[in-house]
């Protein structure tokens, strides 16, 4: 069975772990989250999404 997880959930989990381990301060995480939120509302969002999708498909073993 193949389990798929959205990129938002994946990066959210990574961010939560980083915050818990104090690898990134709360202010830095907030700025990064807000940057991603506002970037998603720009015209660059489809190009970024396509680039990430192509990168994942280029990885060996990725479907």
Image (cartoon, helix red, strand yellow):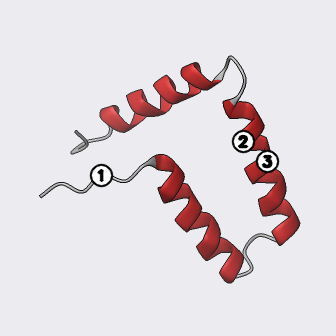
| Relative image position of residue 33 (x, y in whole percent) | 74, 52
Task: Give x and y (percent) for residue 22.
Answer: 74, 80
Task: Determine whether 38 is above or below 48 in the image.
Answer: below
Q: Are marks 2 and 1 in contact (CB under 8 Å)?
A: no
Instruction: Identify whether 61 is placed above or below 16.
Output: above
Q: Quadrant of the C terminus?
A: top left
Q: Which mark is residue 37?
A: 2
9 and 47: which is toward the camera? 9
Name the element at disc 1. Answer: loop
Labels 3 and 2 touching (C-beta < 8 A): yes
Mark found first going from the N terminus, 2 or 1: 1
- Residue at point 48% right, 48% down? 7
When asked about the image quadrant of residue 60, the answer is top left
Number of the label disc, if any, that sits on residue 34: 3
- First in residue order: circle 1 vs circle 3: 1
Quadrant of residue 43 within the rendered picture: top right
């Amino acid at each position: 069975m193949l389990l798929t997880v959205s990129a938002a959930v994946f990066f959210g989990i990574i961010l939560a772990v980083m915050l818990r381990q104090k690898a990134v301060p709360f202010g830095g995480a907030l700025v990064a989250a807000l940057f991603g939120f506002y970037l998603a509302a720009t015209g660059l969002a489809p190009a970024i999404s396509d680039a990430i999708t192509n990168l994942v498909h280029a990885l060996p073993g990725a479907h």
